[in-house]
Image: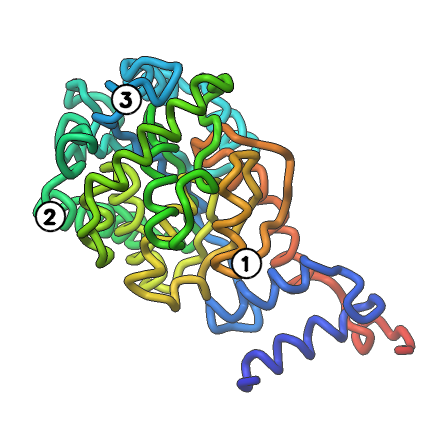
Amino acid sequence: MNSLTAQLKHKIDNKTKPLGALGTLEDIALKVGTIQNTLSPVLKNPTIIVFAGDHGLVDEGVSPYPKAVTQQMVFNFLNEGAAINVFCKLNNIKLLVADAGIDAEFDESLPLIHAKIGKGTKNILNQPAMSSDECIKAIATGSEIVFQQHEKGCNIIGFGEMGIGNTSSASLLMSKFCNLPIEKCVGRGTGLDDEGLTRKVSILKQAIEKHPDALIPTEILSTFGGFEIVMMTGAMLKAAELGMVLMIDGFIATSAVLSAYHFNKHILNNCIFCHQSDEQGHKLMLDYLNVKPLINLNLRLGEGTGAAVAYPIIKAAVSFLNEMASFESAGVSKA
């Protein structure tokens, strides 16, 4: 245990409470203090970025929703009508939306981060989702987006996504990175029935078999990733490098962490996993990373909603560390 960790533990243990009585809040306080290298951490300009992109594999029927819903939901975000808008507004979190690769054009005047790599990925049954150059560009673009927010004073950032078909991409990444059979990684996504789920598993099996040579992280990402997931991966790597606190949402966002982890295992030191998704593979993904989520509300919406809902818990942890009296200052006898 290094000196700072020991000092943080001493500060936490000497608050006016029984030892360990604030449970997970104590773990969060210790983590945020460690990330920020201080006994008095501060959460500045909390921000969630929703990365949006389309997927060529949707043409095979892996989702009950048409591809057009990605664009429609982006307009819903911009019009402040989605769940993520409500929760960000409730908790004073800044919300940004990035077009990572939607199969549609947006007017340049819209309050959108215009970062399109391409108009959706390719159909993985026919060819890799993107070229290696597109993959590298998406990682670099995500990195730059986060750098700009850090420059504006943000030190805690959450990641959301929107993309019809992206649970398929996340399942494929999970299967490759965790070395698990695809059946353990696939869930119902946006609400497939039993027949649709069977079809989805069959299609993703074919996709895995089509690309046996994708073995290293960049190959896996470019073959099976989505533009929004790859851009999130780059954003997460940069956020950790900059010493920011990362709020991780559900299944899709965790697939980006999983990807980033295979570039830099230390990224987990900066991550707070906000919730456990109701999507089947998420628990196994969390187990693979050996991390515990803060809450389980059976959410499976994405958009960063789990991160936005969990933010007040992180805020509570930092607040007790900074504001709660110690036994000494309050004149309270210790056990």
Scheme by which the image is coloured:
rainbow
The residue that disc 3 covers is: 58
Circle on res. 174: none
The residue that disc 2 covers is: 132
Q: Amino acid at mark 2?
A: Ser
Residue placed most toward the observer, 102 or 149: 102
At x 16%, y 46%, the residue is 135
At x 28%, y 37%, the residue is 228
Q: Where is residue 113 shown, x and y percent of the image?
A: 23, 33
Check the image and report above or below for 36 versus 245: below
Element under disc 3 = helix
Q: Quadrant of the N terminus?
A: bottom right
Residue placed most toward the observer, 30 or 188: 188
Q: Amino acid at mark 1?
A: Val
At x 54%, y 38%, the residue is 277
Q: Quadrant of the C terminus?
A: bottom right
- What is the crowding at mark 3: few (fewer than 14 residues within 10 Å), some, or many (at least 20)? many
Question: Does residue 57 appear left or right of residue 28 in this picture?
Answer: left
Q: Give the mark nearer the N terminus: 3 vs 2.
A: 3
Circle on res. 291: 1
Q: Where is residue 244 shown, x and y percent of the image?
A: 40, 59
Where is residue 56, by image quadrant? top left
Residue placed most toward the observer, 102 or 181: 181
Distance of label 3 from label 2 (alpha carbons): 21 Å
Of badges 3 and 2, the one in the foreground is 3
Q: Where is residue 329 shown, x and y percent of the image?
A: 79, 74
- What is the crowding at mark 1: few (fewer than 14 residues within 10 Å), some, or many (at least 20)? some
